[in-house]
Amino acid sequence: KMLILALRNSNWNGKIVLGGPGVLPERKALKEMVDLYVIGHGEYKLLDFCAKECSKVIPYTSQAEHYPNYAPFPLSRYGSSNAVRITGSRGCIKRCNFCDIYKQWPDFVVRDGRDIANEMILQNQTLSTQPNKFYFTDSLINGRPKVLRDMSKHLIKYATNFKWEGQFIATSPKWFTEDDYKTISKAGCKRVSFGIESGSHRVRITMNKKQRDSDLDFCINQLHNNNIEQVWLIIVGFPTETWDDFLQTLDLFYRHRDKN
């Protein structure tokens, strides 16, 4: 707000656009201070805004132009010269009541799996650092199993030696099968972080997480069997959690103590 006020009180007469985390429907006062207030996905809204406010909008003319261009950046100063971040989706298929992801992006939008793989291949082939490690910024990479499956098969087809990781969700074997775990491992998935939240099914229900114990066990076992490192995200002290619920979380760690 201070920045916006400073701009408005100066001689600067440009347009102010806000979007991304923190831009929520209930912040009406902030909305009234800017020219465009984007809730959720902004690409088309921004293009429409530019078409109205600017004299010219340059359209994309090739596939490569819709991928991020990291060439001007000294990647070694960002942690690793052979690693870049990549985004395959926005939003989440869940509506957990402790999370605001679905408020920032009400719809779960995902790219084509082969398109994601092509971006990884292009970055590796065109950047001087030849990145072979990729970190997905997605809230979850397996929100649409077919997309992750297609991406992995495409990477395997081109015999890439990439390593990649992202956030995951524990699901039933019908949603994400044993073969799917084998495929992503073969394609280079080396590590996933996923929200177990609690070892208590009752607590997960009150969180609106709704994962069954059998789903958690299946996911943990499959990741372990396919040499994929797993990072558990746990919430201790959720308002509905009892001592017995907490002990169930400890029991989950005990059952799988050799896998995470």
Image (cartoon, rainbow, N blue to C red):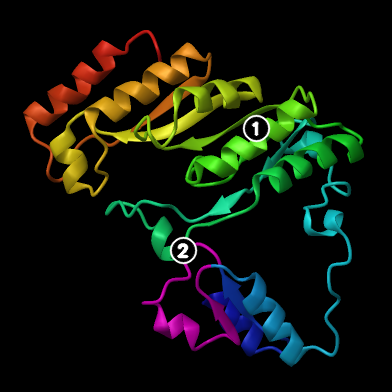
The residue that mark 1 highlights is 152
The residue that mark 2 highlights is 107
Above or below, 63 relative to 235: below
Q: Who's the residue at 40% across and 12% down the image?
A: 259
Residue range in magenta is 20-40
Please tell me the numbered disc located at residue 3: none
Q: Who's the residue at 68% across and 83% down the image?
A: 48
Q: Quadrant of residue 84?
A: top right
Whether residue 13 is visible here, answered yes or no, is no
Q: Quadrant of residue 3?
A: bottom right
Q: Nearer the viewer, mark 1 or mark 2?
A: 1
- 184 is within the stretch colored magenta: no
Whether residue 105 is visible here, answered yes or no, is yes
Label 2 packing within 10 angstroms: few (<14), some (14-19), many (20+):
some
Judge by depth and name the residue closer to the eye, 145 or 63.
145
Task: Answer with mark 1 or mark 2, whichever residue precedes in sequence.
Answer: 2
* Residue 130, x across and y down, in percent: 86, 31
Q: How many marks?
A: 2
Above or below, 173 relative to 99: above
Q: In the structure shown, which secondary structural element does the residue marked by tag 1 occupy?
A: helix
* Residue 4, x across and y down, in percent: 59, 80
Report the amino acid beneath label 2. Answer: Asp
Q: Quadrant of residue 13?
A: bottom right
Report the amino acid beneath label 1. Answer: Ser
* Residue 235, x across and y down, in percent: 28, 37
Above or below, 10 relative to 83: below
C-beta proximity under 8 Å, tags 1 and 2: no
113 sits to left or right of 175:
right
Judge by depth and name the residue closer to the eye, 206 or 128.
206
